[in-house]
Amino acid sequence: MPYELAPLPYDYAALEPFIDADTMHFHHDKHHQAYITNVNTALAGHPELAAKSVDDLVRDLASVPEAIKGAVRNNGGGHSNHSMFWSIMGPVGTPGVGGEPTGSLAAKITEDFGSFEDFKKAFNEAGAKQFGSGWAWLILVDGKLKVISTANQDSPLSQGHYPILGNDVWEHAYYLKYQNLRAKYLEAWWNVVNWTEVAKRFETAKK
């Protein structure tokens, strides 16, 4: 069955004023939909691959024929990454959204980075220094939290890592509101991070 675009789990304007409704409309309805359309096209005639979840597809690119591997890597990655992205943000003012994490995730961040502020700085730097389009990620490697970045729509899943947190630094994610000020977008984005969902992803990463 072809992949389909799930609706946002909140209103398009729910992340205002940090991410504007117009950006959410374009980002979700146009960009994410394009990735889904393109990966579905690439997988036509490959029912065994199309039957996989998009995360499993991206996790095992070695199983994808060379002729469509680039399209699957880019567009399947785009679908997987954006599905994660919408889920780890939440409406402004909702409990668990913005501020800092709590519980075991907060303790692990302090253990591995020194403080939440040090983690934030490292994460923002990864996003700011990613040349061109890409993502900043928080992953767990050998029991330790690590910040990395990837180009384009490459996913940590393809490297054997489960993305706990990720921020999209493609221009389409922020340019309508922040223009060329990527660093300003990166700083504002923390106000809409859904730490409740991120904590769940942290527990999944530990398994």
Image (cartoon, helix red, strand yellow):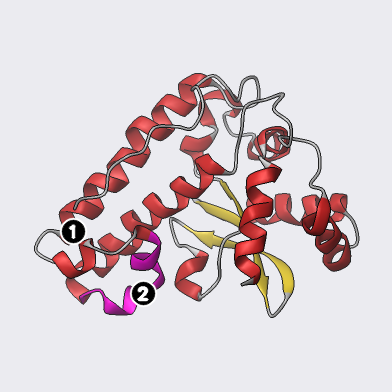
Could you say which is closer to the camera, residue 134 or residue 110?
110
Determine whether, in the image, residue 50 is placed left or right of residue 146: left
The mark closer to the camera, 2 or 1, is 2
Label 2 environment density (alpha carbons within 10 Å; few <14, some 14–19, many ≥20): some
Which residue, given by chain and number where applicable, does mark 1 sit on?
A: 42
Residue 35, image x and y in percent? 31, 47
**Prevailing secondary structure of the magenta residues:** helix
Disc 1: CA contacts within 10 A as few (<14), some (14-19) or many (>=20): some
Residue where numbered disc 2 is placed? 60
For residue 190, which quarter of the picture?
A: top right
Tell me residue 150's x, y (percent): 53, 62
Q: Is residue 106 magenta?
A: no
In the picture, measured across the screen, residue 13 lies left or right of residue 110, that is left
Dot 1 lies on which element? Answer: helix
Query: SS of the residue at dot 2?
Result: loop
Q: Position of residue 104 (x, y in %)?
A: 80, 59
Q: In this rendering, would 100 be left or right of 195?
A: right
> Which numbered disc, 2 or 1, marks the residue that appears first in the sequence?
1
Q: Amino acid at mark 2?
A: Asp
Seen in the picture, residue 166 relative to 21 is either above or below; the reply is below
On screen, residue 184 versus residue 50, left or right, reads right
Q: Is residue 64 magenta?
A: yes
Span colored in magenta: 55-65
User: For the point 87% across and 66% down, which residue is it?
Assistant: 111
Up the image or down, 195 lies above or below 46; here it is: above
Residue type highlighted by circle 1: Ala
Q: Is 28 situated above or below 152? A: above
Q: Quadrant of the C terminus?
A: bottom right
